[in-house]
Image (cartoon, rainbow, N blue to C red):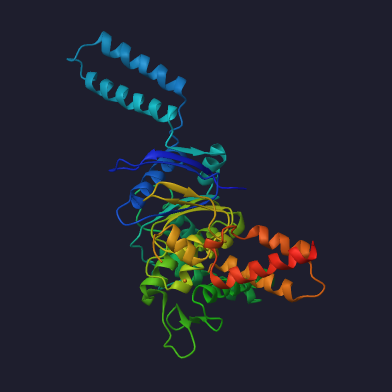
Amino acid sequence: MSGYLTKIKTKIPRTDKEVDIGINGKTLILTGGNGCGKTQLLDLIYKKIFDRVVNRNNHTIQQLKININYYNEYIESNGPAHESYYSWIREKEKTEKQIEELENPSIELSELDDFILKHNNFQAVLLKFEAGRKSDILKPNSVAPIDRLRDRDQKTVSNQSQKTTTSSIFEEFLLTSIANQAFSESEKINNNPREAARIDKWFNKLESDLQNLFEDDELKLVFKSDSFSFELHQPNKEPYTFQTLSSGFSSIMAVYADLITKVSLRSIEPEDLTGVVMIDEIDAHLHVSLQKKILSFLTKAFPKVQFIVTTHSPFVVSSVKDAVIYDLSKLEQVDDLSMYSYEAVLEGLFGVLPISNLLQQNIDTLAKLLESRPINLEKIKLILNELPQSEDDLDAESLYFVNSAKIVINKAEG
């Protein structure tokens, strides 16, 4: 399924800018210069969705007009001396604003009932991660019952201003899981080899994800039984903990640890989790190589979650396919930049004079097709159709292979 948020049409708070963004359930990347309103818009979107999904303020215009009639009757039949008179005035004005919002909605959501029910049943998420986020992973000192961890996760759901996230209990969940694995392996305790194997598989997947994020296939997640804690081990580095991460990795783990702990505690597969997750300055403190992969990593890890992010990075902008990019400086929408080089993105979107992963993959495929015999013209044409059509949007290497392919096609077709 596509994401729930389909359209944003609103004025950015504290500015005179109005945006009209057709998202259609896709990933949304908000970009633009400092001070253009990225954070304000993200906050507004979150507030509007929270009001409809969590607070369930979804009255119809007809219902609201009936309420206004009641307020008018109360106001007309009672004078200002009545103790509730000014309260009725305020409620009437509030209701009139609600009608105006419904007639000109700031956001549009598809399958709203589904979102509300799944969120209420802890099968969907609505999260916003601030720009200055750091992982708040607590170091455990004892094994916590899984039910207690579930309760702590669920308490983070309904409070809009909740500062404690589920990521805080990430390492506690790891400790509980490894204890349950040991209990399941023991013939004298749980004697449940299948559950032990499931937990072992989960830890292997976690370690693989961490290797991907930390860009080190030799990284190991090591449990220290003497301190009831976990360490990250990498060659030629001192072991370190989740509490001593650099600012960049701490920023990543604030998001990843929260989501992976949620799905695990709620017994959901990561690919089945739905909802909307907003991340302000997703590129903050990240090395270029991580800027290129962080968003695509998250969208692949949680494919049914709709991500809405802000960024200054051309590497983030061109890192995912089928995303909507909206430039708040120019108030312009672009539907997909994944096939454009970093040079083209920098110059066209950011106004600055390094090629995207997807473009490089397609150019590499094209180069191999040109070398293969016999020549497969149909595959070459398919690749060319996927590439940017303007030569100005290609780097020199890509342009060389595109022109070579066109020459091959012209010769073959006479």
As drawn, the residue found furthest toward the right would be: 374
Residue nearest the observer in this picture, 247 or 199: 247
As drawn, the residue found furthest toward the left would be: 81
Give how far across and how far down residue 407 sits, in percent.
70, 67
156 sits left or right of 306 in the view: left
Give how far across and how far down residue 398 sits, in percent.
59, 69
As drawn, the residue found furthest toward the front would be: 414
Give how far across and how far down residue 324 sits, in percent.
51, 51
174 sits left or right of 304 in the view: left
Q: Is residue 115 visible?
A: yes
Residue nearest the observer in this picture, 205 or 364: 364
Residue at coordinates 51% horizontally, 68% vertically from top-left? 293
* Quarter of the picture holding the C terminus: bottom right
Residue nearest the observer in this picture, 186 or 111: 111
Give how far across and how far down residue 118 sits, in percent.
55, 45
Give the number of marks: 0
Residue at coordinates 43% horizontally, 72% vertically from top-left? 142
Q: Is residue 192 visible?
A: no
Residue nearest the observer in this picture, 60 or 192: 60
As drawn, the residue found furthest toward the top would be: 77
